[in-house]
Image: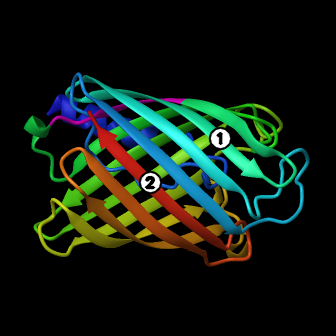
């Protein structure tokens, strides 16, 4: 029981929140990690159909941007993985360009612990370019809490993060929760539909007013072609006037 309590305490107490909603990797993380010795390649393609229209310092407006992110993950042990990201984008006046890179280790609680919910924990260091993020070094802590029933899966990521280098290092911590409900239409091995949620509420010491927060709902579908390949499709609708109002997203995954 000591190991169980230590893992849960780490999830609760490591309070380091995210800066803003991530527009390059729009994904609710699930519990499972990549199997030991295996690779997983994911390609995230997102179009910001209705986004911000003016510069914020050096950060370019997001309206009309296309984001293409390559994510390669290696299973180090059965319960630990390491991932690297190459982040690219197309924006008005910039063409197709390098937008940054990231590193992300992730660990999960073993199934043998027989916890009432499945738990894993992701850490991420981001190194964005100034056209896409005001801070040159960011940190994200993402706990993953999941419960799978016969015909559905519930996933919750109470994501936290902050700037480690840049103008927002003294701005305090922010909370960026995400969640997903997936319903398996037939066999859960090949197809599900669901609803994803992405939010950014402001500093954990005092949330922003509702109209200044970001809340995005994404009706989505997952199609599993076989045990190796899948695609996630979704359309994101912003519920407030802050940030992006309409986003098209696609994620392709291949395990080998």
**Image color mode:** rainbow
Of residue 133 and residue 147, the one placed in the foreground of this image is 133
Residue 61: x percent and y percent? Answer: 82, 58
Label 2 CA crowd tier, 10 Å (few <14, some 14–19, many 20+):
many
Q: Is residue 22 above or below residue 190?
A: above
> In the image, is residue 12 part of the stretch drawn in magenta?
no
Residue name at image x 75 percent, y 31 percent: 136
Q: Residue 170: which quarter of the image?
A: top right
Question: Magenta residues: mostly which secondary structure?
Answer: strand
Secondary structure under badge 2? strand
Residue 31: x percent and y percent? Answer: 28, 46
Q: Which residue is mark 1?
A: 88
Q: Which residues are magenta?
A: 103-110
Q: Is residue 148 above or below residue 137?
A: below
Q: Which residue is mark 2?
A: 251
Residue 50: x percent and y percent? Answer: 71, 71
């Amino acid at each position: 029981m000591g190991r169980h309590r230590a893992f849960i305490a780490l999830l609760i107490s490591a309070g380091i929140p995210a800066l803003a909603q991530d527009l390059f990797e729009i994904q609710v993380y699930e519990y499972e990690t990549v199997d030991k010795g295996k690779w997983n390649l994911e390609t995230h393609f997102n179009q910001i159909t209705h986004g911000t229209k003016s510069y914020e310092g050096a950060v370019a407006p997001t309206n009309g941007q296309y984001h293409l992110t390559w994510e390669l993950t290696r299973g180090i042990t059965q319960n630990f993985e390491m991932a690297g990201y190459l982040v690219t984008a197309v924006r008005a006046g910039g063409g197709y360009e390098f937008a940054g890179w990231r590193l992300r280790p992730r660990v999960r609680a073993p199934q043998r612990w027989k916890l009432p919910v499945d738990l894993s924990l992701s850490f991420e260091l981001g190194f964005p370019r100034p056209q896409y993020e005001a801070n040159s070094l960011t940190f994200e802590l993402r706990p993953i809490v999941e419960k799978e029933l016969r015909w559905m899966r519930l996933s919750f990521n109470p994501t936290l993060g902050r700037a480690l280098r840049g103008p927002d290092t003294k701005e305090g911590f922010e909370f960026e929760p995400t969640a997903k409900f997936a319903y398996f239409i037939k066999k859960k091995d090949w197809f599900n539909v669901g609803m994803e949620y992405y939010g950014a509420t402001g500093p954990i010491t005092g949330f922003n007013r509702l109209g200044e927060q970001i809340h995005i709902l994404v009706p989505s579908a997952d199609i599993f072609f076989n045990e190796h390949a899948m695609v996630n499709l979704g359309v994101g609708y912003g519920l407030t006037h802050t940030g992006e109002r309409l986003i098209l997203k696609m994620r392709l995954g291949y395990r080998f």
